[in-house]
Image (spheres, rainbow, N blue to C red):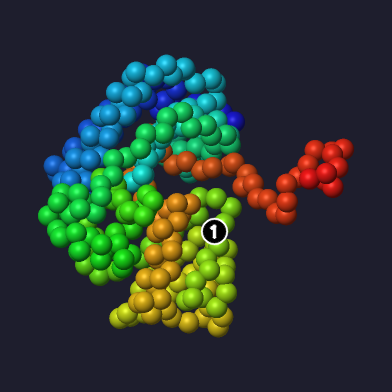
Amino acid sequence: MSEYKWNYLPTSKKEVISVLDEASKDVVNEMRNNPNHTLQYYNALSSLLDKVIMEIASRKIFNAPDDWYYSFEVSNRNARLYLKHIHALIPAENTNAADNEKYTVEFDECFSIINYPVESFSVEEYAKVTKNEPVTVRQWIRRGKLRNAFRVGGEWRIPAISDSPARGYSPVTYYVNCEHVPLRLNTLSSGIGIHNLTITPQGTGMFNIIADGRCLAIPPRLFTEQERIEIEQALLSNPNISNSDSPVGVWPNVTEVSRIPVVTRTGGMRLPEGWNKNLF
């Protein structure tokens, strides 16, 4: 544990609400003074923060024990309040103990306290909100341009905290939220288990696709637009995969680094010592 005391990390319900109040004000200020998103995006995010603040205010949330703190994270799919254990507080070089914002917080335990879903629209609802035709929205999804879309049953849903896609194709990284996800597509010569995958445009209608730092094809080659669409459709349709467009914000606004060990499992279920696996 660092010898420096961190005075900015919230440790009580009152402090969490205060942090989220400030975050809500920051959203409004950005919307008015330096907008990076659409008005619909800001309205949806601001409304979500207000609802979550009311949810937290109505809950019995205990004060965090020593060396623990609360962290709040919003993605396009969920708003989550976490309780995290501080492994270390690491100040940046030439930083004094009072300069909180230049610390890195390393945490080694994390518990989800509140998981609040973000409102989502059907294709028709999203088309109406953004003043587009449903066929246009479906084309955005099919071409991998509306990357926050996800499937519920056989229907696409679009989170309210989503911008309409810009012209052209921007690079994206897809992250696997579990051990790995197998991709078995006609585009690929064989199935591959990925931990993350990055797609970048390479000239007109061609794309470079890298999985876990390794090219998917051997020897390396560029992928066509249709091949990229097939792969990206598989990624978008998988509930265990999120993309680099998904994170919206983390409050308090500090640098956090997870020191939680990654648990991987291979083979079958591990039985307690003394149990006879032949019985199963």
Identity of the residue drawn at 45% across and 56% down: 238
The mark total stands at: 1
Identity of the residue drawn at 57% across and 74% down: 190
Secondary element under disc 1, as helix, strand or loop, is strand
Location of mark 1 (residue): 181
Q: Is residue 139 left or right of residue 172?
A: left
> Which quadrant would residue 180 be assigned to in this image?
bottom right
Please say if 55 is above or below 38: above
> Which quadrant would residue 47 be assigned to in this image?
top left
Report whether residue 40 is seen: yes
Report whether residue 163 is seen: no
Residue 210 placement (x, y as % from top left): 49, 69
Identity of the residue drawn at 32% across and 54% down: 156
Along the line of sight, the residue nearer the viewer: 260 or 197: 197
Q: Is residue 89 left or right of residue 58?
A: right
Residue 53 placement (x, y as % from top left): 30, 26
Instruction: Indicate the amino acid at tag 1.
Output: Val
Please say if 145 is above or below 204: above
Q: Quadrant of the C terminus?
A: top right
Along the line of sight, the residue nearer the viewer: 25 or 179: 179
Residue 36 placement (x, y as % from top left): 21, 51
